[in-house]
Amino acid sequence: MSGVVAKAVEYMVDAGQRSVLFLDIMRRRGDQYREHVNQTAPHVLSYAAELIIDGRKLEQPVNYALVRIIPPEGVEIDLKRRPFIVVDPRAGHGPGIGGFKADSEIGVAMKAGHPCYFIGFLPEPMPGQTIERIARAEAIFIERVIERHPNADGKPCVIGNCQAGWAVMILASLRPELFGPLIIAGAPLAYWAGVHGKYPMRYSGGLLGGSWLTALTSDLGAGKFDGAWLVQNFESQNPSNTLWTKQYNVYSQVDSEADRYLEFERWWGGHVNLNAEEIQFIVDELFVGNNLAAGNIKLSDGQTVDLRNIKSPIVVFCSKGDNVTPPQQALGWILDCYADVDDIRAYGQTIVYTVHETIGHLGIFVSGGVAKKEHAEFSSNIDLIDVLPPGLYEATFEARSPDTLNSELSAGEWVMRCEARTLDDIRAMGGNSAEDERRFETAKRVSEMNLQAYQKYVQPWVKSMVTPQMAELMRDWHPLRLQYEMLSSHNPIMPVVAKAADKAREERKPVAKDNPFLSLQQKVSEQIVSSLDQWRDSQEKLSEALFLAVYGSPALQAAVGVDPESKGSRKREMDASYRELLEARIAELKSKIGSGGLREAGIRALLYVGSARGMVDERSLEALRKLRQTDESAQITLAEFKMLVREQFFMLLLDREAALAAIPRLLPDNKDERRKVFSSIEQILSASAEISGEVAKRLKQVAGLFGLEGNTVPFDPKVRAS
């Protein structure tokens, strides 16, 4: 009995000290919050930066800025490599998340030798600022980056996280000539998409009656929308983490968890404001309207936003563990825009996606583990992605080991390959039925009607009542802000807590790991988490059932002009004008099948043989790069090489027999030159896998076309490309 009492006393001393230290961490969090929000340009970037353009000084001012990231000591930048631009998401919380840690999107890009830039923002929007104006400003920023790197081997690679992802896609569709590859991480491009039983956030707009509530919130803010409401929406998706786990982890590991927790809270609590016009556009056009993928967004100058206009490769990064932007929302736009892979190719588009199994929404662009793997591989192999033939691919990653073939040809700890996929692979992830599409279309129309009614009958009255002082007071009293303010040092009780915490640290006596009361504490915590998760699950089931029932009503659908029998398809047809251009381009390529020389023949043969594998491996690209470096006659720019690859790929796609039959006519008489190119093809193919099966069969066919059949020496895969 005395042993149990001793362990109880030991636990109570530890628990009391942890409680005091936990409260002190909350005090430090509050003080940090006050200090952060009082800064003119608060951010959480872990890198020094040089201001290049202040968006507030543009002809149409915005609260965005372009900065150059100054490389830390020991990091060497190659100015001939394409620059990377990270665009920060403005989704309610503060700026800097793309460079939040050393192992970040910025960090891994600099480690790969790329110059890096960052587009961030200030807490307060400029008067009259709109989403369209921001897009125009970001175009100016990218133009300046291009001007600063005239000798770079490609246009900038632009990374858009979350909200910045769809913003970057909009701009790239309007100004495709400015962009190199796009990396879109956790961005909801098709907000209606999802599967039953998951991702209830997509139902919220319909359950609230549409976007009238957004307009009301902006009016109560005197023309500004408080980003804290967006952050609260995110937090409501996981109440067990919001209400318990996040704080419990600090309490239970109070001696080691404080710095990590405070670092994250500095960003998470840095709420920013949006103009009413900005948030209304986001909700009406993207969340409730889902107009981006459908091509229904029109700008003030009459331009239509059509994602099919994007000419740069698009890398989409999403996760099954992301309940804010699940894979269906990140990838569903592809099904809306294209009928099949041939349609993707017809628009000259290259789309690469990768799906993480478990990481949550923030982890996609915050997690150090993700940065070291996926983002590091994309940064190191961005040129591979840029020269991929048009089509749809999935990026997969295999851990590099001593047994990995030609492992020295891979850049990091992983080997990346891009495997050919079809639209059926995306459909297999699940999506909406025709009935679901009708429900969301009905919710959209109800939203439009409710918004019009609010704007006509209620909005004038609300605007006349709200003063800027009232709006500021309501922002200050937002629950998310109060939780920081109430526990800061401005609370007269908290300085007493600070002194008690100093004493607790001096007399700290952590409980033994095997203490039974510590185990009981953990079990109680698990029970609380389980209860909150069950409550969340029941609420989500109820909200889904309510949405499906209300907006699935044939009577309501008919009342708002939705045909209850419609197929609900959002697929888009190719414009007649684009089809004419495409047919002219096809005729041009067919006429050039017999044109060219040894270089064209070599690329055509490599594409023909390599396509039998249905994938492209980074080791093959590295082998090709090394061969180009040692061959002075092959010194063409990356853009020229990309065009060469695409032309030869399309020639094979349009008329494979004619394209192959023309190869002998493109070759020189010098047999040594032909043998040298053929040997290079073998070397590139052997860099990632042994030559066998259909690949070996096609290679033998190419040997005959090169006039080398029976005269070639079997290639030794152990010979390195270097």
Image (tube, rainbow, N blue to C red):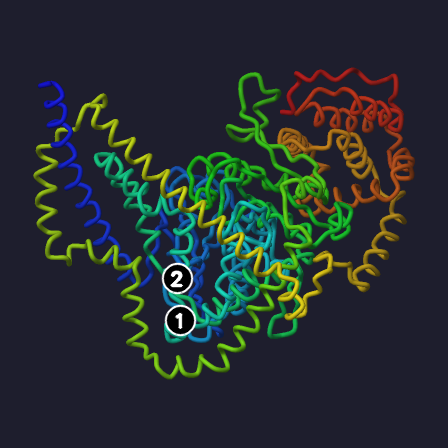
Which mark is on residue 280?
none
The structure residue drawn at horizontal position 87% and vertical position 33%, both measured from the top left corner, is 668
Residue 513 in which image quadrant: top left
Give the total number of marks visible in the rendering.
Answer: 2
Of residues 716 and 121, which is closer to you in this image?
Answer: 121
The x, y position of residue 310, in whole percent, is 66, 56
Read off the residue under disc 1: 224
Residue 530 located left or right of residue 593:
left
Residue 175 located left or right of residue 482:
right
The kind of residue on which mark 1 rests is Lys
Which mark is on residue 227?
2
Cα distance between the residues tagged 2 and 1: 9 Å
Of residues 11 and 642, which is closer to you in this image?
Answer: 11
Residue 416 in which image quadrant: top right
Tell me if I can see residue 53 in this picture.
yes
Quadrant where the image shows the C terminus: top right
The x, y position of residue 81, in whole percent, is 55, 44
Vertical placement of residue 635 versus 280, above or below? above
